[in-house]
Amino acid sequence: MRTNSFSGKLALFVLLSLFVLNMKPVVATTPPDDLPSLKGKKILMVWGGWEGHEPRQVTYKLKPLLEKEGAIITVSDSLGVYANKKLMDSFDLIIQAWTMGKISKEQEKGLLDAVKNGTGIAGAHGGLGDSFRENTGYQYMVGGQWVAHPGNVHKHTINITDKNDPITRGINDFQLKSEQYYMHIDPNVKVLATTSFTGEYDDWIDGAVMPVAWKKTYGKGRVFYLSPGHVADDFDSPELMELFLRGIRWASGSKYLPKEEWVSPVYPGKN
Ligand SMILES: [Zn+2]
């Protein structure tokens, strides 16, 4: 009797476990172990530029989440910080939310040198992918530049295309009502998620597939970019915030972890 009762409980436990394991949460509740931790990491958050993108709100929405993980945050609403080499050398990661605007030669050099030397950089939407339009050296570092958002704010789908990368693993495709960025992109970035355009607004791009999240390196620094995030409320999407947080964790590791090698040409080369 005792054995039977135990077997029954065991069977129930196994059944329940199988049920739990089979459930597919929208977002994995725990980050994959193979992403670096933010504990003790020094992060510079820089916000400014075009106010339509709510750079201050986006920055202060993210900040407590990073602090909860143990990050030490410095916030700057001026690009002047980029020209302070001593300070820049102390950061593990820069998170920039600065659409358009102008950057001085010294500030741009300070930023690019820091990333080249191993400080990671992460950002979303125009805050990283449409900053300092005249500065091609900056765009070479980011790996892409916004050019259009056909249809402005409308519902569209984000497709997770790399299911193995720790930044995207376990996250399902999701919908967003926001701007759908059309970008000019470095073909050597590692694309993690895409979105597909219809011909509804511009018929010549019907069927175009556009990266929305990528990782790359610039010198020793890790660069993570996410194209959605038009306003702070966009980050109420749990999937979008999870992608951003994971990309931030990944980019924070460049001073401590070996360089990843995954450049994979997308065009035919010499035979
Ligand atoms: Zn926007």
Image (cartoon, rainbow, N blue to C red):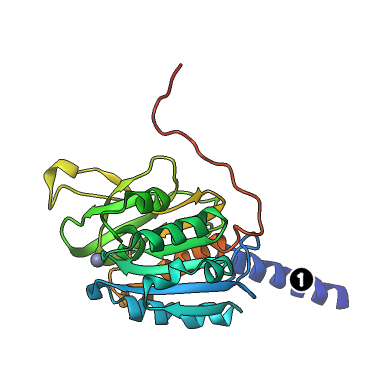
Is 117 on the left or on the right of 138, as rendered?
right
Is 207 located above or below residue 154 in the figure? above
Query: Which of the 4 image quadrants contains residue 132?
Result: bottom left
Q: Which residue is mark 1?
A: 10
Is 30 located above or below residue 190 in the figure? below
Is 204 on the left or on the right of 216, as rendered?
left
Q: In the rendered image, is residue 27 in sight?
A: no
Q: Quadrant of the N terminus?
A: bottom right
Q: Depth check: 16 or 229 in front? A: 229
The residue at the point 20 percent across, 64 percent down is 154
Q: Quadrant of ligand 1?
A: bottom left
Q: Depth check: 13 or 214 in front? A: 214
Is 47 on the left or on the right of 88, as rendered?
left
User: Percent position (x, y) of residue 211?
Assistant: 36, 50
Q: Residues within 10 Å of mark 1 (few under 14, many from 20)?
A: few
The residue at the point 53 percent across, 72 percent down is 43
Q: Is mark 1 within 8 Å of ligand 1?
A: no
User: Percent position (x, y) of residue 104?
Assistant: 33, 62
Outermost residue toward the front in this view: 106
* Element type at mark 1: helix
Is 210 on the left or on the right of 82, as rendered?
left
The residue at the point 64 percent across, 64 percent down is 18
User: Percent position (x, y) of residue 25?
Assistant: 50, 68
Query: Which of the 4 image quadrants contains residue 244?
Result: bottom left
Q: Depth check: 106 or 115 in front? A: 106
The residue at the point 13 percent across, 48 percent down is 202
